[in-house]
């Protein structure tokens, strides 16, 4: 029995492919891609997905999300987080290590992988901590973590405060062949800030985190990476200054990449007016200037990766005073349509580049399998209906986290089918399994 | 002018007519305070809870008396004497209070936006009695009232707000109120205590007190929170006082009929010299009296029928 | 469009005569003007009280103390109104204790305004007595209140409106009645 995806516009940037074609999937593998292969279709045994007018793309990959398990199961679990991913069109997610305990040793990685095998609906790639307990003092056993399955290292949720430790980490991680994804924040500069420092923090009387708190750290990590000739990936780029730093660094041949979240493209600090903690996120929602700079950075290739920074929280956690509510936005399920709205609709990125930023670019940078529709590869495929319209709401919502600031937004272009290893895990916006 | 809002969360977003209606209503309220029997039956059968998450004898007493003078029943809840200390959330506390039939909650809270949070979750009317560094609307209204009473107008006056603007809810509410009423507002303080983009609120920004006071009709001196110095935002109390303290010599830079305000409590000899605070140009005790009148006016206006629409 | 039917009950002359008569009655009933003060209820009771003051001065040669009372804070219907009525100043610049207060209003109807006014007076002191003077008594009392001095008794229906116009506030002197349902 085989699965046919018929008549869709197949976009696979990894192969430079963008044309109408059929796809055949059998035994979990992508076995054929071409014209008229649906002639092999046997209605008695085979399954057909009609994709005319839709986009057929490699399964989306999110290199930055928080599944919260173990320790934060009230906010999210591997099961619910991967279901949210499937509904968002993602076939693979990288789970950040800031769980309880922190994913900083082999047993923790084994636990996550076992959980993923048992309850995960999409592929889960662990990200290991840079420092033990993410305390910023001692390096983790990065080699063992890499051998156990960690695809990258990060202390995400907080920065590595000490430049010396970060330099050692970049140097050592390079030896393991894994990249460091850096949460860039100078915590002394960020202080007790809860939103972007600017006009709105002044109006609202909320403590501000200045853009320079991010940029100082980005500058530092670029220089550190350069000094040990190691690659570095900048997580959740949010300011115009960061974009410029990465642009300049890349023009000097420094191996730095950056990722952008949906919320930093879709929202600015104006959204904080009204004090709804659902808008509280770190790095914070920035200004319109920053938002436009992120778009320019994506348009000119300075920024090549899109990642959700999906950070679910319970309503109890979020319905608190703005100053004490936790940072984070649960964005897996709304990422694609927000990216579409912000990048494709205004003509900032061609669809091809949007797909690349969510498939082959992150796959290559993080050394992940997938990210392509090459024949012979495991069949991770996402079908997008660019005409599908939906209002963001809680019907069929999968994440435990409802901290999503796009609630109530009417968005167009949604993933309608998600296939992981040949298994259909989402169809017509409903998660299956 | 109609007052038709559910809550009073801030001065930002309130228009000139609404401010005038509050100030005008406060005039007869102030008369009630001068009577032998300081009580009118206006809010009989209504209940007002003062929910204070931050110590403030002055504001709490002012609200409590305002409510009592209008015959409302009042209850005070402060952090040290309720389930607040047991970790109950603001929303749960608010809902519990509401379930007991409370009509108005007067909220003082250390977190900016706390009044907004509460108003979203309870049907009772919410009056913001100061939230973090965000707003303190009734303080601004009593300042406006005091200025108007002394000067006969607000429009066209030059008002200098002096001190820690960064952390001051009094400064923010005053800026919105004064600019709405057509006053020219200057802010002055150490560069490290001026919030970013403050000029975008429609004020002139100064770091030299002499320039800020030149020709001022009113000086509103803010209280310096002494812990700011411990956080390193300025080098020493001594230098602050030397650079920004309002003394007789600096007062002479203002107009001769200058009016000096201070929201209290004062650090005499730090942000304001003792002889300035005691001088006729200062209306610091009048502000306290006017505070009760203005809060009576607010309670009165907010008790009418089915108001709708919060000020956010 | 039909204009509501409007019938004049009093013209300027009638109004002046009514004031004159009430002034005489006040003096007569109180055996002079000793300890007498006038308090008008805002808004139209105040100019009426001023006229009574002038008239009594003409009769007795004594200028009675005159106050103005705003009863808004004492109304019993505040919490049912959608918008709070504007509060005006109460100006009673003399002590009420031991005084005979003549409360003055334009129209006596349900009696609720007078009830509120009496409460307000009591809160300002302890008068020896309160008397009530009104230009028009239109009936339909809801409280056990009656006027001591009445310019004119006018039987009305509840659907009718009695409109008093005074020179000081409205530009002319007249009293008319109109049917609100027409």
Image: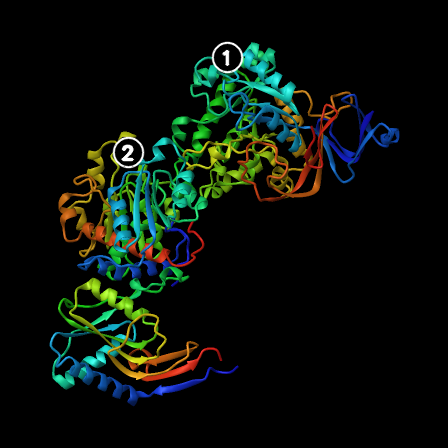
Task: Residue lying at the far front in this picture: please name it.
Answer: C144
Q: What is the x, y in percent for residue C156?
A: 39, 81
User: What kind of element bears circle 2?
Assistant: helix
Q: Nearer the viewer, residue B219 or B73?
A: B73
Query: Marks 1/2: CA distance?
Result: 39 Å
- Mark 1 highlights which residue? A140
Which chain does tag 2 point to? Answer: B
Q: Give the residue drawn at x 50%, y 12%.
A: A140
Q: What is the x, y in percent for residue C124?
A: 19, 63
Q: Give the residue drawn at x 29%, y 34%.
A: B80
- Mark 2 highlights which residue? B228
- Judge left or right: residue B109 versus residue A310: left
- Judge left or right: residue B169 versus residue C40: right
Q: Work out whether A180 lies above or below A47.
A: above
Q: What is the x, y in percent for residue B285?
A: 19, 50
Q: Give the residue drawn at x 65%, y 40%.
A: A344
Q: Nearer the viewer, residue A9 or C157?
A: C157
Q: What is the x, y in percent for residue A399?
A: 59, 32
Query: Is the C-beta separation of discs 1 and 2 under 8 Å?
Result: no
User: What kind of element bears circle 1?
Assistant: loop
Q: Evaluate whether label 1 is on the same chain as label 2.
A: no
Regarding residue C117, the answer to whether it shows in the image is: yes
Which chain does tag 1 point to? Answer: A
Q: Work out whether A426 lies above or below B59.
A: above
Task: Residue lying at the far bottom in this picture: please name it.
Answer: C13
How many numbered badges does the structure rendering display?
Answer: 2
Q: Nearer the viewer, residue C71 or B29?
A: C71
């Amino acid at each position: 029995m085989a699965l046919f995806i018929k008549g869709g516009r197949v976009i696979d940037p990894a192969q430079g492919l963008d044309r109408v074609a059929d796809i055949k999937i059998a035994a979990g593998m992508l076995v054929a891609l071409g014209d008229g292969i649906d002639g092999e279709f046997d209605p008695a045994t085979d399954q057909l997905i009609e994709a005319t007018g839709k986009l057929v793309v490699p399964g989306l990959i999110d290199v930055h999300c928080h599944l919260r398990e173990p320790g934060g199961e009230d906010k999210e679990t591997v099961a619910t987080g991967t279901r949210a991913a499937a509904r968002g069109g993602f076939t693979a997610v990288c789970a950040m290590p800031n769980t309880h305990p922190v994913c900083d040793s082999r047993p923790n990685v084994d636990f996550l992988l076992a959980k993923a095998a048992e309850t995960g609906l999409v592929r889960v790639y662990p990200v290991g901590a840079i420092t033990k307990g993410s305390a910023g003092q001692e390096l983790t056993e990065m080699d063992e973590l890499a051998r156990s399955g960690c695809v990258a290292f990060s202390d995400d949720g907080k920065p590595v405060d000490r430049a010396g430790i970060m330099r050692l980490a970049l140097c050592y991680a390079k030896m393991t062949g894994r990249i460091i994804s850096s949460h860039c924040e100078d915590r002394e500069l960020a202080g007790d800030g809860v939103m972007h420092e600017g006009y709105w923090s002044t109006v609202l009387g909320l403590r501000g985190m200045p853009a320079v708190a991010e940029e100082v750290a980005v500058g530092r990590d670029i220089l550190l990476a350069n000094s040990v000739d190691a690659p570095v990936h900048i997580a959740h780029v949010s300011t115009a200054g960061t974009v410029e730093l990465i642009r300049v660094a890349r023009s000097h041949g420094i191996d730095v990449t950056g990722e952008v979240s949906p919320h930093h493209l879709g929202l600015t600090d104006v959204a904080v007016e009204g004090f709804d903690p659902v808008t509280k996120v770190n790095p914070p929602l920035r200004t319109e200037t920053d938002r436009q700079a992120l778009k320019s950075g994506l348009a000119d290739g300075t920024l090549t990766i899109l990642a959700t920074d999906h950070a679910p929280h319970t309503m109890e956690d979020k319905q608190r005073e703005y100053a004490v509510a936790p940072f984070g936005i649960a964005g897996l399920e709304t990422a694609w349509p927000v990216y579409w709205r912000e990048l494709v609709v205004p003509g900032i990125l061609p669809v091809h580049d949007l797909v690349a930023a969510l498939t082959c670019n992150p796959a290559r940078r993080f050394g992940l399998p997938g990210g392509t529709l090459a024949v012979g590869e495991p069949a991770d495929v996402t079908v997008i209906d660019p005409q599908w319209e939906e209002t963001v709401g809680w019907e069929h919502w999968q994440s435990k986290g409802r901290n999503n600031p796009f609630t109530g937004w009417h968005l167009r272009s949604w993933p309608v089918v998600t296939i992981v290893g040949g298994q259909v895990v989402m169809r017509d916006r409903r998660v299956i399994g | 002018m109609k007052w038709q809002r559910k809550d009073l969360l801030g001065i930002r977003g309130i228009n000139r007519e609404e401010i005038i209606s509050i100030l005008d209503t406060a005039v007869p309220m102030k008369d009630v305070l001068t009577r032998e029997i300081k009580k009118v039956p206006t809010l009989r059968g209504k209940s007002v809870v003062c929910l204070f998450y931050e110590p403030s004898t002055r504001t709490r007493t002012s609200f409590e008396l305002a409510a009592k003078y209008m015959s409302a029943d009042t209850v005070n809840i402060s952090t040290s004497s309720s389930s607040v200390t047991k970790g109950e959330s603001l929303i749960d506390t608010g809902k519990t209070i509401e379930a007991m039939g409370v009509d108005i909650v007067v909220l003082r809270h250390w977190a900016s936006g706390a009044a907004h949070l509460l108003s979203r979750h309870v049907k009772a009317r919410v009056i913001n009695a100061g939230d973090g560094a965000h707003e303190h609307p009734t303080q601004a209204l009593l300042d406006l009232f005091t200025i108007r009473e002394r000067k006969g107008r607000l429009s066209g006056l030059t008002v200098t707000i002096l001190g820690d603007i960064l952390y001051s809810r009094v400064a923010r509410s005053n800026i919105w109120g004064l600019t709405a009423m057509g006053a020219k507002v200057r802010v002055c303080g150490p560069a490290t205590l001026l919030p970013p983009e403050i000029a975008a609120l429609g004020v002139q920004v100064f770091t030299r007190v002499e320039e800020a006071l030149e020709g001022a009709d009113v000086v509103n001196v803010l209280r310096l929170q002494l812990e700011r110095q411990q956080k390193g935002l300025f080098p020493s109390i001594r230098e602050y006082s030397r650079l920004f303290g309002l003394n007789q010599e600096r007062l002479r830079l203002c107009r001769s009929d200058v009016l000096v305000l201070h929201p209290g409590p004062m650090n005499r000899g730090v942000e304001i010299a003792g002889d300035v605070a005691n001088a006729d140009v200062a209306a610091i005790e009048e502000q306290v009296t006017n505070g009760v009148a203005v809060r009576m006016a607010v309670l009165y206006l907010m008790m009418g029928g089915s108001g709708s629409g919060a000020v956010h | 469009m039909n204009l509501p039917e409007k019938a004049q009950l009093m013209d300027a002359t009638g109004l002046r005569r009514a004031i004159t008569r009430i002034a005489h009655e006040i003096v007569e009933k109180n055996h002079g003007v000793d300890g007498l003060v006038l308090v008008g209820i805002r808004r139209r009771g105040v100019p009426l009280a001023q006229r009574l003051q002038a008239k009594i001065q003409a009769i007795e040669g004594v200028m009675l103390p005159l106050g103005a009372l705003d009863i808004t804070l004492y109304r019993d219907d505040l919490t049912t109104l959608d918008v709070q009525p504007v509060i005006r100043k109460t100006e009673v610049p003399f002590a009420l204790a031991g005084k005979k207060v003549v409360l003055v209003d334009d129209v006596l109807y349900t009696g609720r305004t007078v009830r509120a006014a009496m409460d307000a007076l009591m809160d300002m002191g302890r008068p020896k007595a309160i008397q009530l003077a009104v230009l028009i008594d239109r009936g339909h009392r809801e409280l056990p209140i009656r006027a001591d001095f009445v310019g004119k008794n006018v039987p009305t229906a509840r659907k009718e409106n009695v409109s008093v116009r005074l020179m000081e506030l409205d530009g002319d002197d007249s009293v008319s009645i109109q049917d609100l349902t027409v």
